């Protein structure tokens, strides 16, 4: 995964390569330690399969730190690439005996090749997305529910990596879990405001239906889309993701490793065609 910009070892990919190396080395070491072993029961009770299935629940009462690396290709006439590392801490907070609030943050670190002549490569931090889900601690008629606000924060370090405006809107999730299966959907809509004169205000919807199955030995197979509809351009972006994950245990530390592949069924002109995903998730059960 290192050296995405061929022939440009001193270019903007170098910082992302360093980040990926820092993730890959401990992950490889952990994986080597785990070879030939099954995941024992995690700290805090329950078994590895139960804990793995909690990862399929966006509003689970579980602290986790996913590090999600995405590599997409097929941008523009030059068939260029994009590397994206999402740092996604999830922190549940107990409000009272009946309610939790789940904080889900997405901090994107990007490395983007110029998609067309006359454009420049760009790398750095993108806009942060912060979601807060107010979620009943017990299912409602079998449904696990959550809803609240989502915020777009203009934290991009390069104009090409962000929208240069604040945004706010609603977000919600609903899912059911039974016999290893999880089915549900997460949605949000963001309206931007105070945009610069040379930019449209953000007006976009996100729709993520998902289906997963977790085996008794803590393998998880997943299918989802992460579709975005831009109301300003009447344009869908529809990647379909297939993934397989395994939960393993290193002492008292549960860690999930996921590998995924995506195809874009719909994208703007010059948008991506396909991609790969690798996720390392550190879990901190109570």
Image (cartoon, helix red, strand yellow):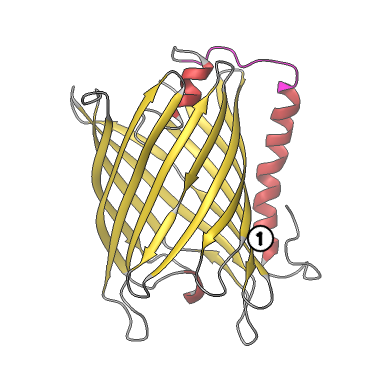
Start and end of the magenta stretch? 34-43
Query: In which quadrant is the C terminus drawn?
Result: top left
Residue 175: x percent and y percent? 33, 33
Q: Tell me if I can see residue 86 in this picture.
A: yes
Residue 220: x percent and y percent? 55, 29
Quadrant of res 164? bottom left
* Residue under the point 41% across and 60% down: 228
* Residue at the extreme front of the image, as rendered: 265
* Residue under the point 21% across and 26% down: 140
* Residue under label 1: 15
Q: Tell me if I can see residue 57 in this picture.
A: no
* Residue at the extreme right of the image, as rendered: 7
* Residue under the point 77% across and 70% down: 8
**Of residues 179 and 47, which is closer to you in this image?**
179
Quadrant of res 270? bottom right
Residue 203: x percent and y percent? 30, 68
Question: Does the magenta portion include 20?
Answer: no
* Residue under the point 52% across and 24% down: 214
Q: How many marks?
A: 1
Residue 174: x percent and y percent? 30, 37
**Of residues 144 and 122, which is closer to you in this image?**
144
Tag 1 secondary structure: helix
Residue 244, compared with residue 224, is above or below; it is above
- Main secondary structure type of the part rendered in magenta: loop
Quadrant of res 72? bottom right
Residue 239, compared with residue 116, is above or below; it is above
Is residue 162 found left or right of 134 in the rendered image?
right
């Amino acid at each position: 995964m290192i050296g995405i910009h061929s022939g440009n070892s001193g270019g903007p990919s170098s910082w992302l390569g360093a980040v990926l190396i820092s993730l890959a080395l401990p992950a490889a070491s952990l994986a080597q330690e785990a070879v030939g072993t099954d995941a024992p029961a995690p700290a805090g009770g329950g078994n590895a399969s139960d804990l793995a299935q909690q990862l399929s629940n966006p509003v689970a009462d579980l602290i986790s730190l996913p590090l999600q690396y995405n590599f997409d290709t097929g941008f523009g006439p030059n068939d260029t690439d994009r590397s994206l590392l999402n740092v996604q801490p999830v922190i549940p907070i107990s409000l009272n005996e009946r309610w939790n609030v789940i904080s889900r943050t997405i901090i994107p670190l990007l490395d983007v090749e110029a998609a067309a002549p006359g454009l420049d490569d760009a790398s750095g931090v993108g806009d942060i997305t912060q979601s807060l889900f107010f979620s009943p601690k017990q299912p409602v008629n079998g449904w696990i529910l959550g809803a609240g606000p989502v915020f777009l924060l203009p934290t991009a370090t390069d104009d090409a990596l962000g929208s240069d405006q604040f945004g706010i809107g609603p977000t919600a999730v609903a899912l059911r879990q039974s016999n290893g299966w999880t089915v549900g959907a997460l949605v949000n809509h963001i309206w931007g405001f105070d945009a610069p004169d040379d930019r449209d205000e953000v007006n976009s919807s996100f729709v993520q239906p998902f289906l997963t199955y977790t085996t008794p030995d803590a393998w998880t197979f997943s299918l989802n889309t992460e579709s975005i509809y831009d109301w300003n351009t009447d344009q869908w972006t529809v990647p379909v993701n297939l993934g397989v994950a395994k939960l393993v245990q290193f002492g008292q530390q549960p860690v999930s490793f996921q590998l995924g592949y995506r195809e874009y069924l719909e994208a703007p002109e010059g948008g991506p065609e396909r991609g790969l995903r690798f996720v390392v998730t550190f879990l901190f059960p109570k």
